[in-house]
Image (spheres, rainbow, N blue to C red):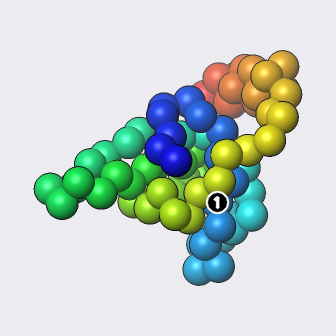
Amino acid sequence: MSFDEDDHVVLHDKHSEFDGETGTITQTMESMFGDTTYTISFEDGQEAGVPEDSLEAAEDVDEATVEDEEDDEEDDA
């Protein structure tokens, strides 16, 4: 399954501080070998270069909650 920008995903990478957390894809990149990697934005940071097999689609993300989080981020800036 491929993902697009603004999709909500759960990261599964035991070496990441964001393992098991839900984030939003902010960028997709394709290597010269045709592999796609992603940059995921989390509440406390971001993770870049994440391969597709380390991600799963987040279930039932409440859009109102996501919008509230985005508004909070804008207020902090």
Q: In the rendering, at what x and y percent does residue 7 appear? A: 59, 34
In-image side of 49 versus 18 (left or right): left
Task: Give the residue at x 57% y 45%.
Answer: 41
Question: Which quadrant, please, contains the C terminus?
Answer: top right
Task: Give the residue at x 48% y 57%.
Answer: 52
Residue 75 sits in which quadrant?
Answer: top right
Q: In the rendering, at what x and y percent does residue 49 appear? A: 39, 60
Label 1 SS? strand
In-image side of 15 versus 72 (left or right): left
Image: 7 above or below 11? above
Residue at the farthest left position: 32
Residue 68 sits in which quadrant?
Answer: top right
Inspect the image, locate mark 1, and give the three-letter code of the amino acid beneath it. Answer: Leu
Residue 64 seen in the current view: yes
Task: Give the residue at x 76% y 28%.
Answer: 66
Image: 29 above or below 35? above
Task: Give the residue at x 61% y 39%.
Answer: 24
Q: Residue 77 or 33: which is nearer the viewer?
A: 33
In-image side of 46 versus 32 (left or right): right
Image: 30 above or below 21? above
Which residue lies under the disc numbered 1? 11
In-image side of 59 versus 57 (left or right): right
